[in-house]
Image (cartoon, rainbow, N blue to C red):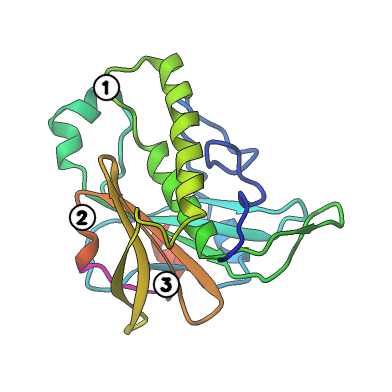
Amino acid sequence: METTSRVAGESAHGAPKGTQSTPEGAPVARRTLDGYLRAPFPWYGLDDAFTGARWLMQVAQAADGTVQHGSIGHGDEPSIRPEAAAGAAADRERFAVVVTIAANPVRHSGDGGVLEATSVSSAAWLAGSGLLSFTWPAQMDHVRRGEWLDQQTETAWELADDLEGPDWSTLSLPVDGEPTDFHYRESEFGWILAGSAQNGVHLGAYGRGLSAYGLAFSVVKDIRAYE
């Protein structure tokens, strides 16, 4: 089984350390092109068959400034407002987020140590925690949501570390035109995908409102177009 750990630079809530957060605990998107341009790996998004809006989210960096992973959004920018989660606004939200993470057999930390390798499980963890960051059950106040989010995040972590378990199925989707097997999971909050591309990256994805079954992924030709 692949080993994984919480990706360096991630907090318990899935946001890169140092990223500002809203009072509800969701990361504020750092919509700067800089980090994306400095990444030593290609970025992935939905392929050209998707004609909706595309938008930058955030990147996570190691202590030495190396970009480790990042996310690109497609469709409606999701809301985490509790009133939206229970009403028609949430029903209209149609979005998919693609997470790209460098596939490294060994990662060095900023203090000279060695971290566990990134894996498909790492991509699953990032996708699962990302979906949770846009989920807020309507009946919860801010305090209770923090407790709920901690519990659900830990569950997402455990599920990501057991991709061969009964909670996951297999879904084949095109990546750069090639059929690729993904680990796939649905929940009441949305869906999650995790797999690998052929050029040294792992891919995670999550969304609501858009069916995962019709998606295809490809390298982003010009990340500047997403700004």
Residue 148 picture location, percent across and down: 43, 25
* Residue under the point 19% across and 49% down: 209
As drawn, the label of residue 210 is 2
CA neighbours of label 3 inside 10 A, class few (<14), some (14 to 19), many (20+): some
Front position in the image: 125 or 69: 125
Does 23 sit above or below residue 186?
A: above
* Residue under the point 19% across and 58% down: 211
The tag earlier along the polypeptide, 1 or 2, is 1
CA separation in Å, label 3 and label 1:
36 Å
CA separation in Å, label 3 and label 2:
20 Å
CA separation in Å, label 1 and label 2:
22 Å
The amino acid sitting under disc 3 is Val
Q: Nearest to the eye among marks 3 and 1: give it.
A: 1
Residue 10 picture location, percent across and down: 61, 44
Does 149 sit above or below residue 206?
A: above
Quadrant showing the C terminus? bottom left
The residue that mark 3 highlights is 220
User: Seen in the image, is 164 located left or right of residue 41?
Assistant: left
For residue 57, say whether it is visible: no
The amino acid sitting under disc 2 is Leu
Q: Secondary structure at mark 3?
A: loop
The tag earlier along the polypeptide, 3 or 1, is 1
As drawn, the label of residue 138 is 1
For residue 49, say whether it is visible: yes
Q: Secondary structure at mark 2?
A: loop
* Residue under the point 53% across and 72% down: 201
